[in-house]
Image (spheres, grey):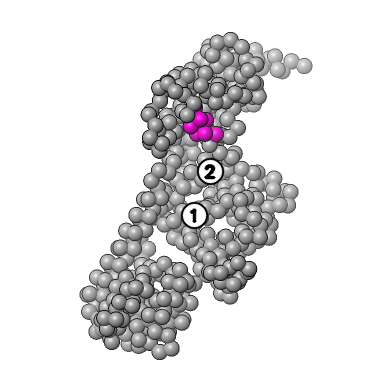
Amino acid sequence: MTAKAHLLIVDDDANTLASLARAFRLAGYEATVCDDASKALELAITQRFDLILSDVVMPQKDGLTLLEDLKRNEVAAPVVMISGQATVEMAVRATRAGAIDFLEKPLSTEKLLLTVENALRLTRLESENRQLRQRVGKHEIVWKSAAMGELLRQIERVGASETRVAILGETGTGKELVARTLHERSPRRMGPFVTLNCAAVPAELIESELFGHEKGAFTGAGARHMGKFEQARGGTLLLDEIGDMPLTMQSKLLRVLEEGEIERVGGERPVAVDARVLVATHRNLEELVKAGTFRQDLYHRVYVFPMRVPPLRERREDISVLVEHFGRQLAEQNGWKRKEFAAEALAALEIYSWPGNVRELRNVVERVLLLTASERVDAAAIHAALPEMTMAGGTSMAAAVGTLAARVDAFERQVLVEELRRNHHHMSNTARALGLERSHLYKKCQQLGIDPGELRKTENKP
């Protein structure tokens, strides 16, 4: 269900405020009234309004000054000006200051409602266009493995809620992409998606980055700065690498999550915020809590629904489709001719351990496309791009012998034996861990000369 648009009506005449508020509420809007421009500015800074309707002629501070103050304080809501003493000069000044429309009193209720409806529609269209531009060229989740299929099912289940999700996974697995997909599946999809990498911001600046600061709050603060929480109003805020957030900042973040308000650095009043907060980390938060470097109460606030992004070595079935995706993407971005990856080239990529995960794979694909002169990428090109290739389990490819097929078989045999041991030789659990049907696992073991029963007996011998 779409939320009601929230309007702020500013006028020094009580009767006008009452009649306008009643008309808007009957039309299905939420209306807040204010009879003083200075108070209206404070409301607009601390609360979120979808549109501001202001009279021009008011005592102490007029509407045009209010309009200029709103823009100076980066209030994003569109403003419609009204006046019973309108002049061409006044209308021009209002338009130059950023007013979206200018209406003369006495007001026609029908015309006023139409103006507000059009202004809100225009604002929504501009927001949608910004979101669409942001999405152009963005990565999509590319997969065919059972592990990623399960992850996407989790995203579908949780995306439409306001549940806080902790996205866990090694560096380069695509945690931010998962967060973006959660945002796209949520009712906040037309709002902004904002990220802050907690590990990349110096400890002394992270509070300002998150909460913003007022002009003059510290040396170099020449203007008011809107923090990530305010930038994410109506949308989603991803706190990436939250395990690296300083302890002092963790307590302040906890208060914001509990109260829904921030205080800008150097500010004197709280500011209401409205953003769904997601967190991501490659670190073990439970271990950090035990070590005393991550607050337990914050852990319970952000660790509501943990979502693990599997490393690439656990989703090798996805390598071929990812290579196709990256190859097409890089060709389009750089104006390159598309190249085909031979079966033996893909097999060579599937043997590699991928410590840098999907991010490393994309870099390798780009490197290979640059190094290969022909229209077909072969295994030799892969070896040239990865001279120190290492198979999963730590075995160096240089140490492997025999044909490529023999090396692939050796690698698969090693993976199956290790996974059988890890699952105490339980075939169903092993098949589930590898994303295989149980019958397929039996067939693979037979092809590779692995006898699970004999393996169990051998390992159980004293």
Q: Residue at x 52, y 18 (%)?
A: 380
Does residue 58 lie above or below 367 as drawn? below
Q: Residues within 10 Å of mark 2 (few under 14, many from 20)?
A: many
Q: Secondary structure at mark 2?
A: helix
Q: Residue at x 42, y 21 (%)?
A: 374
- On the image, the x and y values in percent for residue 406 come to 56, 12
Q: Residue at x 36, y 50 (%)?
A: 132
Q: Is residue 306 left or right of residue 289?
A: left
Seen as rendered, the residue at the extreme front is 373
What's the residue type where badge 2 is placed?
Answer: Lys
- On the image, the x and y values in percent for residue 239 come to 56, 52
Q: Is 386 covered by the magenta stretch?
A: no
Quadrant including the C terminus: top right
Residue 318: tell me if it is visible. no
Q: Which mark is residue 194?
A: 1
Q: Residues within 10 Å of mark 1 (few under 14, many from 20)?
A: some
Magenta residues span 360-368
Does residue 333 lie above or below 127 as drawn? above
Spatial separation of the CA atoms under disc 2 and disc 1: 14 Å
Quadrant including the N terminus: bottom left
What's the residue type where badge 1 is placed?
Answer: Val
Task: Find disc 2 in the rendering and name its residue.
Answer: 175
Q: Which mark is residue 161?
A: none
